[in-house]
Image (cartoon, rainbow, N blue to C red):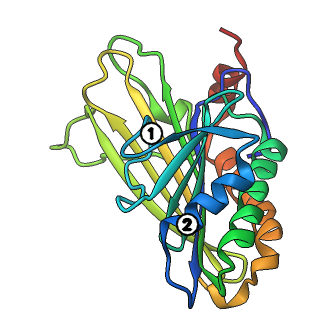
Amino acid sequence: MHHQYANSPLIETVFEVRFRSDVGWDDATANATYELLSSEFSRQITGSARFVAEDYDANAILQFWRESDEDGAVILSPNALSVTHLQPYPGWEQFKGLVMRVYDAYLQAAQPQGILGIGLRYINQLRLPAVDGYVNLSSYFNIGIVLSGKQLPEAFESFMVELRSRHRNNRDVLALTWRGDPESGPSPTIKFDLDYRLLRPETISMADVGTWLDEANGEVHTVFEGLIRNELRALFDKKE
């Protein structure tokens, strides 16, 4: 996303790409990719790590972290690549630069035949101040839940809303998940996940990924800013 708030709710940013390849995958491809990036990434690990997202490929062959800040990581799987950055978010240009360096190294090492899918995901989490034990969501968001029946409760302890929208002439889709955590106490935790993905991979060549990323980031930024109200922006801009 474009705007960097002083107290940003963004806790993880993820780029994912799946490739079409006529060549069998083995550990040598993952190791060759790592060698091309070894000046920037030095900590190799296997198995699970401290990611926020829960649906990384269980077949990951290799994971490695940036030496400089340990907040950026690469996950290599058979014919798939993920780049993730935990908070603090470094800004779009820095994150995109990291993604493209890793992406170019993968292309050089693996020589895939084409793109099967691309995703750009922003995972946000924040706590809202409660008044008398309640939070008025409509004060902070331009999306809401209305319970209008007289027999329905006026307040609720948890919620989850899922929305999907098409973008770029139906080339892409954005899945928005917005939910409240019932276990987070009097100051509730609100999570909203913006998962932007390519629907029509035949429209994208491997050389187009950088352009697609800029367009995807712009679409997500527009939706994110449309979701929130000035009261929430004030909280995001408040320095702790």
Q: Kindly identify the residue that appears in the image at 56 percent across and 44 percent down.
A: 64
**Mark 1 is on which residue type?**
Val
Establish if 183 lies above or below 63. above
Q: Kindly identify the residue that appears in the image at 69 percent across and 22 percent down.
A: 234
In which quarter of the view is residue 238 placed?
Answer: top right
Q: Where residue 81 sits in the image (x, y, percent)?
A: 57, 63
Residue placed under numbered mark 1 in the picture: 52
Establish if 162 lies above or below 65. below
Residue at disc 2, secondary structure: helix
Q: Where residue 112 sits in the image (x, y, percent)?
A: 65, 81
- The local crowd at label 2, few if under 14, some if 14 to 19, many if 20 or more residues have their Cα within 10 Å, is few
Give the quarter of the figure containing the C terminus. top right
**Mark 2 is on which residue type?**
Ala
Residue at disc 1, secondary structure: loop
- Residue 198, can we see it? no
Q: Where residue 15 sits in the image (x, y, percent)?
A: 62, 57
Residue placed under numbered mark 2 in the picture: 28
Alpha-carbon span between mark 1 and mark 2? 28 Å
